[in-house]
Image: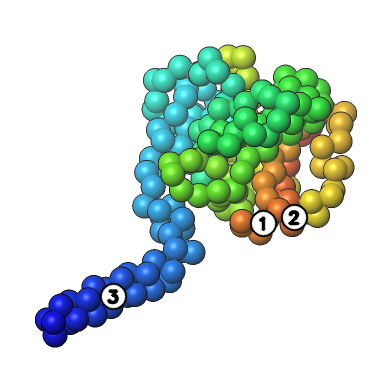
């Protein structure tokens, strides 16, 4: 009886210690995983084109035929889903807000993603790590559109003006902020490289 009681105490102690470690490590786990992700140019920019050239990628993988967004600095390579509801990306991916422009239009394209982490779902969890000046690309109907991030900000969840129409091509990306809440929106604004180059001539 005493041996059984000791074993029970040992098992219980192990469970308590394991649970304590999990609680202590869990908040930092996404950042730990991010540190050890493959950051090779070919992973950061997996498709041939202007983005791959800017990242020094030697990939020979053709531009995707489906619509996708690639953000090298946070290793995002996700489909852009067309749907009337955000529930379409419950299992991952990104969503183009249906009331906004498509990327080839001279207007504001708004792409949204969840900020979950886990279950092999790739989301905008690390969107806060994208810096002004970083490049990214949208692949839309076989065309590559490369952007440079020009603005990063946090706005209230009611700030619908981030989806307003614009006179020129613009990409607006947003997710929830802080993590695990929907109180605010973390917003990136990016401009097409071609437009930025033309403005400097």
Would you identify the image quadrant in which residue 111 lies?
Answer: top right
Q: Nearer the viewer, mark 2 or mark 1?
A: 1
Q: In the rendered view, does 156 fall on the left or right side of 22?
A: right
Residue nearest the observer in this picture, 104 or 1 = 1
The location of residue 149, given as percent across then percent down, is 67, 42
The location of residue 129, given as percent across then percent down, is 57, 53
Mark identifier at residue 155: none
Pointer 3 with pointer 1, Cβ within 8 A: no
The location of residue 150, given as percent across then percent down, is 72, 44
Q: In the image, is residue 132 above or below residue 76? A: below
Measured in 3D between alpha carbons, the distance from the residue under mark 2 to the one under mark 1, in whole angstroms, is 8 Å
Pointer 2 with pointer 1, Cβ within 8 A: yes
- Circle 2 sits in a helix, a strand or a loop, which is it? strand
Q: Is residue 184 visible?
A: yes
Residue at coordinates 68% horizontally, 24% vertically from top-left?
83
Q: In the image, is residue 115 above or below residue 68? A: below
Q: Provide the residue designation for mark 2.
A: 184
Quarter that holds the N terminus = bottom left
Measured in 3D between alpha carbons, the distance from the residue under mark 3 to the one under mark 2, in whole angstroms, is 41 Å
- Circle 3 sits in a helix, a strand or a loop, which is it? helix
Residue farthest toward the front in the current orientation of the protein: 1
Q: Earlier in the sequence, mark 3 or mark 1?
A: 3
Q: Provide the residue designation for mark 3.
A: 12
Residue nearest the observer in this picture, 194 or 40 = 40
Q: Provide the residue designation for mark 1.
A: 181
């Amino acid at each position: 009886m005493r041996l059984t009681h000791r074993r029970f105490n040992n098992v219980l102690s192990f469970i308590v210690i394991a649970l304590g470690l999990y609680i202590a490590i869990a908040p930092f786990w996404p950042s730990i995983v991010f540190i050890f992700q493959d950051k090779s140019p070919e992973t950061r920019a997996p498709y041939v084109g202007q983005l791959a050239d800017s990242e020094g990628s030697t990939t020979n993988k053709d531009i995707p035929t489906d619509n996708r967004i690639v953000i090298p600095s946070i290793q995002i390579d996700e489909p852009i889903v067309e749907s009337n509801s955000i529930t379409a990306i419950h299992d991952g991916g990104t969503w183009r807000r249906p009331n906004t422009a498509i990327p080839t239009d001279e207007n504001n394209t708004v792409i949204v993603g969840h900020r979950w982490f886990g279950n092999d779902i790739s989301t905008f969890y690390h969107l806060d790590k994208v810096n002004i000046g970083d490049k990214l690309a949208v692949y839309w109907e076989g065309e590559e559109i490369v952007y440079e991030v020009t603005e990063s900000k946090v706005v209230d969840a009611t700030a619908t003006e981030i989806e307003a129409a614009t006179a020129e091509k613009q990409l607006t990306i947003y997710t929830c902020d802080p993590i695990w809440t929907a109180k605010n929106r973390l917003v990136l604004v990016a401009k097409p490289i071609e437009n930025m180059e033309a403005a400097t001539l």
